[in-house]
Amino acid sequence: MQRRITTYVYSNDPVLQAGVASQLGLRPEVIVVGEAALDTAEVAVVVADQLDDSVRRNLKALQRNGVPRTMLVLGVIDDAVVVAAAEAGVSGLVRRGEATADTLTRHIRKVADGCGVVPADLVGSLLGQVGRLQRQVLAPRGLHFSGLTEREIDVLRLVSEGYDTAAIAKQLCYSERTVKNVLHEVTTRLQLRNRSHAVAYALREGLI
């Protein structure tokens, strides 16, 4: 039997909030909780007409209160909204016109499991924007989306293979000081504890 996902529903419109909460409350896959139990929610569903400053503030408040994942149900979703929602830390986007109880429940489960949800017709444009960001902003600075440069990845790969500083310097034709500086830069910038932690990060990101 699948676990039930604790879900909090919020809208600036109390009638809309009550309607969505009532729909979801009938589903055996979901447990709808009120504000008093907000700290137990795995997913927060925010329902609004558009992603405006008020909705952004509500999203930040939910995240500050420890809700790990948020999902937006909006009247209008376009390319700009997808980017703005990603910047706001949203995990899922659903158009209100498509927000049946079945659809919401299915997407809540995906979001709770760590997956992202975006309307299918916007996936292509989202990938295009990601590609442009990589080409125009990150690549000229020698960076990947992971925040690591090619040189940093090369050094971490050799660390993961058991090479010490001197051996890494010899392999890559760097000075030992350069290797140490690279490792120091990575751990400082990404707030990692040491080189082992940096290797674990690179492995988790699939970079080495």
Image (tube, rainbow, N blue to C red):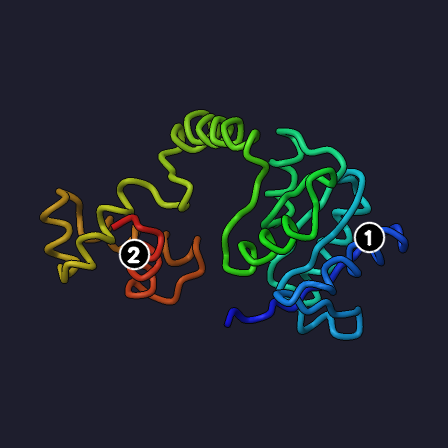
Spatial separation of the CA atoms under disc 2 and disc 1 = 40 Å
Q: Quadrant of residue 66?
A: bottom right
Secondary structure state at the residue bearing disc 1 = strand
- Label for residue 137? none
Position of 190 compared to 162: left or right? right
Frontmost residue, 13 versus 68: 13
Frontmost residue, 90 versus 11: 11
| Horizontal and vertical percent position of residue 127 | 47, 31
| Horizontal and vertical percent position of residue 166 | 12, 56
Instruction: Give me the residue at 57% from left, 30% from top.
Output: 122
Residue 149 vertical placement versus 18 (above, below)? above
Position of 69 compared to 52: left or right? left
Residue 146 vertical placement versus 44 (above, below)? above
Which of the marked residues, 2 or 1, is nearer the chain's N terminus?
A: 1
Residue placed under numbered mark 2 in the picture: 203
Residue placed under numbered mark 1 in the picture: 11
- Which amino acid type is marked by label 1? Ser
Residue 169 vertical placement versus 76 (above, below)? below
Position of 86 compared to 168: left or right? right
Q: Quadrant of residue 20?
A: bottom right
- Which amino acid type is marked by label 2? Leu
Instruction: Give me the residue at 69% from left, 72% from top.
Output: 39
